[in-house]
Image: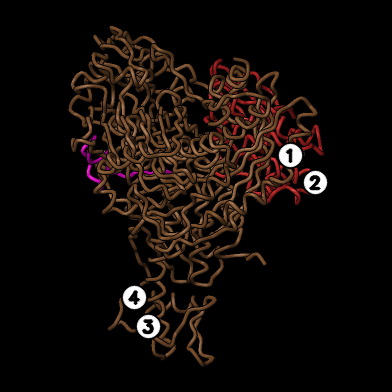
Amino acid sequence: MSEVKMTVNGKAASGKVEGRTLLVQFLRENLKLTGTHVGCDTSQCGACVVHVNGQAVKSCTMLAVEADGAEVSTIEGQAAPDGTLNTIQQAFQDHHGLQCGFCTPGMVMSAAALLKDNPKPTEADVRHYLDGNICRCTGYHNIVKAIMAASGQDVSTIAAE
Amino acid sequence: MPKDSGIGASSKRREDIRFLTGEGNYTDDINVNGQAYVYFLRSDVAHGTLNSVDTTAAEGMDGVVKIFTGADFEQVGSVPCGWQVTDKHGEVMQEPRHPVLAHGKVRHVGEPIAAVVAETLEQARDAAEAIEVDISELPAVIDMKDAVKDGATKVHDDLTSNLCYDWGFVEENKGAVDQAFKEAAHVTTLELVNNRLVANPMEPRVAVGDFSRGTGEHTLFTTSQNPHVIRLLMGAFVLGIPEHKLRVVAPDVGGGFGTKIFHYQEEAFVTFAAKACNRAVKWTSSRSEAFMSDAHGRDHVTKIELALDKDNNFTALRTDTYANMGAYLSTFAPSVPTWLHGTLMAGNYKTPLIYVNVKAVFTNTVPVDAYRGAGRPEATYQLERLVDKAAHELGVDPIKLRRQNFITEFPYATPVAVEYDTGDYIATMDKLEEMADIAGFAARRKESEAKGKLRGFGVNCYIEACGIAPSNLVGQLGARAGLFESCTVRVNATGGLVVMTGSHSHGQGHETSFAQVVADMIGIPEDMVEIVHGDTANTPMGMGTYGSRSLAVGGSAMVRATEKIIAKATKIASHLLEASESDVELKDGAFTVAGTDKSVAWGDVTLAAYVPHNYPLEEIEPGLEETAFYDPSNFTYPSGAYACEVELDPETGVVTIERFSAADDFGNIVNPMIVTGQVHGGLAQGIGQALLENCSYDSDGQLLSASYMDYAMPRASDLPMFDVDHSCQTPCTHNPLGVKGCGEAGAIGSPPSVVNAVLDAMRSGGSTVDHIDMPVTPHRVWEAMNR
């Protein structure tokens, strides 16, 4: 077992982990941050996306020890301290960009990474970027619309949600 | 002017807040103090004799609590099947025993052989690797037609063959149908495959069993669409635990799509093991495990024929289907190819004579059961591909041929035992033609051709039977359960309501839409109504959510319970107002006396119910809480017309969806935003079936598509923006809300129009191919165009 220390959502976090412990396991089991989900075992579905040092990472594909010393940000750290949703979260609610909610944390975290790199993405940009995030409920229509709306673009011409 | 609250408003979903902030409470988020973890050692061969399972070495490994094998479950009941089909000879289906852990034989890849309970999941997995399993492999039974040949290897030695049942519907009509074919001016025949799919909710299944020696109570936390059904099936038929000692909790569930209806052996295992180990036991499925243990969907092989007269009127329809059951009968498996499929074969058409034959077959594959649409997509696909083929053979417009044969008068009794209450197939087709901009298609095709691409247009109609189901009817059809729904409405002293429903929400947004209905009925803000679901400890016995039934059946129970509340509250109000009850009415959250300005607020009445100082105690009890059970008198019949436009690259065979239009008739609508979202999701699954998804076994029964590396889930870049309309509304006549259900429509209605569009594109490139099987992959398209 080794000791890992990292900053998670702005707070210091530490714990003892095995070499094989994945970052997602550390977040869910050690830190009880269960908003980050596991939907597959082949790094395809993206339900586990978090940010590590500002980069979107599939936390099922990174060992906890690799994140030692890193700044980690998860879905639990996205809303304001008073609970106000951030722009992307609010857009997902406004445009019905989620149904069962299981893929949603990963979608929100991926969307944040996309908009950081590409503040005004086209529909095609968004769809391409979401290749690593699978949703089985929404057909993506409202997810794409929500992300474009969160970028400040007018989505009123896209068919109704 | 759109409403901003209540029935008809696109109220934002209240459940989104917890899902968007990581505060959802999914089953894998639940940990019980002191829990152990189970890892299932699963069969890696499809069929074999289990000679021995030696756990000696594994038992001594670090962290191992206890190891279970099939022998530990010999005295435990079989995982039950909830539907018994009677075949065309009047015999009941063949029904094999389904053990919790394999015993004597293994019958599909993924069947659990042993279960290791250990302190950690890693230790359980490590120990499972040390279990020595001796299996003599047997020939695998995979192809359905081979499976029912004389002399075929049997999946179950104690059954007479691999034929579960041979069902004829309606058997008495067979002679007349055959005669109509003899007299037909034209017969169109089509052979097709409805590809095997895996439902793949993004949340894999999870089960946590707990047991208290102090109280003798069992608790099961599970990813279920219907916790009460699991409690009854597992308690009564597998483990022998009475309901009052068994609590089943299905908290936030991350998608179901049918595959979380069924009772699975992992649920029985953790419940059993928690008592045996005297500590909680948790199982979390990996995705690979999900592929080989979640019930699969579809998997029909069908020959269908349509007889037409000289004026192109449909005169008879005949189908012959092989339906894969897999190795065991999953909970509702026998009903899917029969009562959820045969009864829909009339579609939207007034074909007077129909005969459906279904042979259900056991194979060495994962059990097959209901997946979004369940039987109805299979019926729709056959019929709507067939009608398109007939139109091309006859040289008539496919839309015109459909319109000519539409049912136009309602109620309409089909020759396959159901009565459609309402519908307007002309209206949805009119709407679709407008949405799809058929007039502009020729220009769009030219644009595609200028880029070296082919463009195709396809349509289809659909009808579905939802709002499952009248209990007395399904009882006659072999259901071993009632299909009512329940609701308890508890009004608190200060006027807020807790609505406890037997329905279950796993993405459908019931917490929002159900609250809209109750708030609207009383005339109070939606946030005064809380919806509780998913826990047998605090909801009345209900049958859960599937078959687009929640609002039609569960919502109706909720309306009935709320009506009882209003009736009692009106009595209390009339006492407070010193008025005759018949003069008192509830409007906008207040009771008023007709023709006066006397009024008492909702909250004052509810307070009086719990602080009954000024109260007619001699006439009515204090308190304000009512329960209703609602059993529908008929199915509901949502319908619609869909159009797909594809672009096809003849160089590569790649097909892209350029436009997709859906005109649905769901009757009345409570939350248009949620309804549209349901259609979007259904369309993605239907398009996924048509273009991408295929669950594939090799001839040895090895599952070739057991991860997202091999099973093509639709991604964002595979799909277009959808054009969805539900303005055509013919309300259901037999439930109080006039609703029909919308959850499955997209998945039922979309595959045929996609394939019809692909074939249209291929024809425009000179191809004479008249059928292509799903999924319509680039490889299949290229081969079809170049053979």
Q: Which chain is brown?
A: B
Residue indicated by mark 2 = A153
Left or right of B411? Residue B48 is left
State the image coordinates of residue B185 (x, y, percent, origin top left): 44, 39
Mark sitting earlier along the chain (4/1) = 1
State the image coordinates of residue B751 (x, y, percent, origin top left): 54, 36
Q: Residue at x 34, y 38 (%)?
A: B356
> Callout 4: 10 Å neighbours few (<14), some, many (20+)?
some
Closest to the observer, B348 or B217: B348
Type of amino acid under label 2: Gln
CB contact under 8 Å: marks 4 and 3: no
Q: Image quadrant of residue B612?
A: bottom left
CB contact under 8 Å: marks 4 and 2: no
> Is disc 1 placed on a helix, strand or loop?
helix
State the image coordinates of residue A133 (x, y, percent, origin top left): 63, 31
The disc label shown at residue B442, or none: 1
Q: Mark 4, chain letter? A: B
| Foreground disc of the pair 4, 2 | 2
Q: Residue at x 53, y 62 (%)?
A: B516
Does any portion of residue A80 appear in the rendered image? no
Q: Mark 3, chain letter? A: B
Mark sitting earlier along the chain (4/3) = 3
The disc label shown at residue B622, or none: 4
Left or right of B396? Residue B142 is left
Residue indicated by mark 3 = B613
Which residues fall within the magenta stretch? B232-250
> Callout 3: 10 Å neighbours few (<14), some, many (20+)?
few
| Foreground disc of the pair 2, 1 | 1
